[in-house]
Every structure is written in structure tokens, then in C-alpha cells.
Image (tube, rainbow, N blue to C red):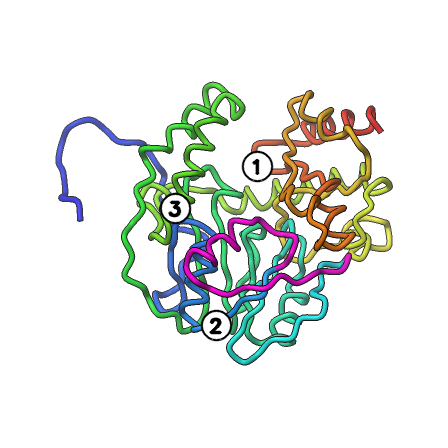
Amino acid sequence: MKKKEYGGYLPLELNRKTEYFNYDNDCMIRLNCGRSAILCAVFDAGYKKIHLPFYTCQSVSEACRQYGIPYEYYHIDDRFRPLHVRLKEDEAILWTNYFGIGSRNREEQIAAEYGNVILDHTQAFFAEPVMDVYNAYSCRKFFGVSDGAYLIHRGLRQRELQQDVSSPTAQYLMQSVEAGTNAAYHNSLENEKRVERAGILQMSELTRQILQSVEYETVKKVRKQNFFYLHQRLKALNQLDALADRADADGGYRIQDEVPMVYPFLYECDGLREYLISHCIYVPQWWKWVAGSPEAGAFERTLSQYLFALPIDQRYDEADMEQICRVILNYV
């Protein structure tokens, strides 16, 4: 524990208030990344095996192998519902709230149907936890921090963990303010590698103080507004049935409390990704390994190849959303 210091230079100024999640210790653990939250859920419950969605990052299965946790992949339908999953008493299913558009009702249905559930909220930071099951959150996908995750569940046992130290590789966050995210991209990848190598750690103090300074209500408002704008302009082209399911009487998107991570634009069009990137709209191909896997289902391969995760975060406004739309519509 660091000693109290007096005098000297002034550190980074952060308007410290409170984190978005602030449960008691028997309900929440602060961790360094989403993988750590998922692993801690498995250890806390004593699950002997976990069922993972095929459409997911391989880092989760790699972490399972590293810690000796047996796993099995399952497929999803075009509404992201699990297909043909049968759990034994000591097994669990990881269900992903893709893009942050999954409803509270859907999560409660999954929890009720399977019982042993880890809700993957790494793409749904603002989703309210279902306290009878495990809820894993990631901070880096929603805020400018270099590590950070939460595991939330009623009756959690705290673990003795070393605390992460993120400042040595957090320089890219400040660099991006002055030079843009593309200029700092290489350094951000170095931080990703650091987090991946670190294993299971507590959240760093730097990240926790940054999270205490975030204007969460503003973030929620902006993300929703940007999501709605893109949907109104692109819904006629979007081939994602899960969005069509939530259409209201006027063709808009019916939302409850969810705050999306991105706008998921599914459009089978070769060359669009490269065209967007050439116009400084960075839409990486998520989980390329799925597109090339003969074991993946047709829908999962389509998502991997043609899902464009359009940015809607708090850096942007309506003019930015219109620019993204113009670029897409000009190409298609």
C-alpha cells in the first residue's frame, strides 16, 4: 500500500465521484479484464465445464485452456438464442449480450432456462445485472481506460489477487487525445498484449479513479441517440433479424434500458470494410477465425465476415453519424 505523500508536483486531475457499479464486496469483484471476470465466475461456482458461443473471441477459450477449464462450443440462431445446449449439474453456459442490444427479458429467460449461467456483458456495460447468476462486464469497450472489469453476483467470495498496474502502458490514452486514436493504435495493441499476459488481477487504481470520474448518464444518452440515428438511416439495408424483432409501429427501434456498444450493421457486401477504413471509419472484422471455421454455422460465418460494428460512442454526435451513413450509402 502506497504511503500518503505531501507536496511535490500535482498528479492527473480527475473529478472523482463514484463508479457506475458500487455493490458490496459480497456481490462484486473489480478485475482487470472481461476474461478474468468469466474465469472468476467459473472458479467461484466450481463449474467443471463451460459452454461457449461459437461466435466469440478465441481469447476466452485460450484462457480456459490456460487454467484447465474444459469447454465446448455451441451455436446460436439468428436471434442469438443458444441451440441444442444441455447442461449437466456442474456445467455452465456463457451467454453473450451481443452489441448490448439484448433485452432484460431475454437475459432473465436465459437465466431461468439454464440456471448455471454467466451473462457476458462485455458488450453491454450498462445492462442491469441478473443477481441470481454471474454477470461479467468489461470497461475498455465503453470508456478510455487501459484495463478494468466487474464480476457481479449475489454471494460472491472475494479472491486474494494482486492489483494490476496499468500506468506503464496507458500512455496511448493521452497520446490519442493529441494525435488521434490511429496514431496511438500500435501502443494500444501493446497494452492489449500486456493485459492478456497478466492473467487474473484486480482492477488498477488508475482505471478505478478514471471510472469514478465518468459522466455515465451523458454516455448513455449519447450512445442511444447515435444508435437511433444510424438505425433510422440504415434499417432498410440492415440484414440483422434481431434488430427487426425490436421494431416499433413506426419502424424505429424499440428500446428499454439497454445502451448499445455499437450499431451492428449486417450487410453482405464485399469491399465495404476496406472502403470504410479508407474513410477513417475503423470497423475491424470481429473474430475472423469463425469465418474460416468449417465447424461454424452459416449465420456465425456471415456475422464474422459481414457484420460492421459501427461506432456510436460518446465521442460522436449526429453530424458524425450522418458522415458514416453517407460513406456507406455512397458505396452500396
Which amino acid does the dot numbered 2 rest on? Lys
Q: Earlier in the sequence, mark 2 or mark 1?
A: 2
Which amino acid does the dot numbered 1 rest on? Gln
Query: For mark 2, does the 10 Å Cα neighbourhood hold few (<14), some (14 to 19), or many (20 or more) residues?
Result: some
Residue 63 image position (x, y, % from top left): 46, 54
Give the Cα separation between the discs numbered 2 and 1. Answer: 40 Å
Give the Cα separation between the discs numbered 2 and 3. Answer: 36 Å
Q: Earlier in the sequence, mark 1 or mark 3?
A: 3
In the rendered image, residue 240 lying in the magenta stretch gets the answer no
Residue positioned 64% across, 38% down in the render: 312
Figure quadrant of the C terminus: top right
Q: Earlier in the sequence, mark 2 or mark 3?
A: 2
Which residue matches tag 3? Answer: 212
Q: Which residues are magenta?
A: 53-78
Going by the image, does 155 lie left or right of 162? right
Rendered image quadrant of residue 75? bottom right
Which amino acid does the dot numbered 3 rest on? Gln
Rendered image quadrant of residue 207? top left
Which residue matches tag 1? Answer: 314
Which residue matches tag 2? Answer: 48
Disc nearest the viewer among 2 and 3: 2
Badge 3 marks a residue whose secondary structure is loop
CB-based contact (under 8 Å), mark 1 and mark 3: no
